[in-house]
Image (cartoon, helix red, strand yellow):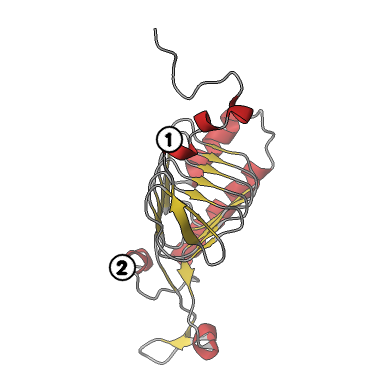
Amino acid sequence: MTPEERIAKGLLFCPGDPTLKAIKLKTHNLCSEYNRTFEDETEKRKELIGQIFAEIGEGSFAQGPIYIHYGTHTKIGKRVFMNFNLTIQDDAFVTIGDDCNFGPGVSIVTPVHPMVADERRLMYNPDGSPIRLCYAKPVTIGKDCWFGANVTVCPGVTIGDGCVIGAGAVVTRDIPANSFAAGNPCRVIREITEEDSMIHKPEVIGEFLVAPPEK
């Protein structure tokens, strides 16, 4: 079984495997190059980010700097905005839906390491030779989500469509669709409803509308 097949099945794998190291080296170098670009070098940025991720939809933008581990394990939808200092440690697969917005310092992590220190340092092949191992759990983020600054999404989490995750949250469990959730560990505070519409905030909305005017 290849390392990629082991990752997909949620089995222990060796992150030091040469094929995996080659993927990470390429992606880390591409990220370094992206982070050295100017913001108005739009064509160069588009080319680089297309090489970093398995998929990135039309209209998606990463402010940079970005820190991506594999990239080939991450699919990003359309019109996604990713602010400063995005980290995606995508040992397992990461899926991000359309129209998400991430504040500064968002981290998405998938790897899981053994809890026992001796096992974390070394385990063993069937022939008795030592090896370092970990495993990883995929992360899925629905469409139309907004993450505040410094949110951390932990391995194996699914976040439903339309969620708002408060700044500094550490998301350790699934969040159902249309929820406002916050805290460490992150918990659902309440459902997002029509009462949250900007139409109920006249002191903020000013002359703007939440829907096109009727003709």
Q: Quadrant of residue 121?
A: bottom right
Residue 153, above or below 162: below
Nearest to the eye among marks 1 and 2: give it: 1
| Residue 82 placement, left or right of 3 | right
Earlier-in-chain disc, 1 versus 2: 2
| Residue 132 placement, left or right of 140 | right
Q: Quadrant of the C terminus?
A: top left
Q: Quadrant of the N terminus?
A: bottom left
Amino acid, disc 2: Lys
Residue at 41% x, 61% y: name it. Answer: 157
Amino acid, disc 1: Lys
Marker disc for residue 66: none
Residue at 57% x, 56% y: name it. Answer: 151
- Dot 1, crowdedness within 10 Å: few (<14), some or many (≥20)? some
Marker disc for residue 9: 2
Q: Which element is circle 2 on?
A: loop
Q: Which residue is under mark 1?
A: 78
Residue 50 lies, in percent from the top left, at 48, 39
Q: Quadrant of residue 13?
A: bottom left
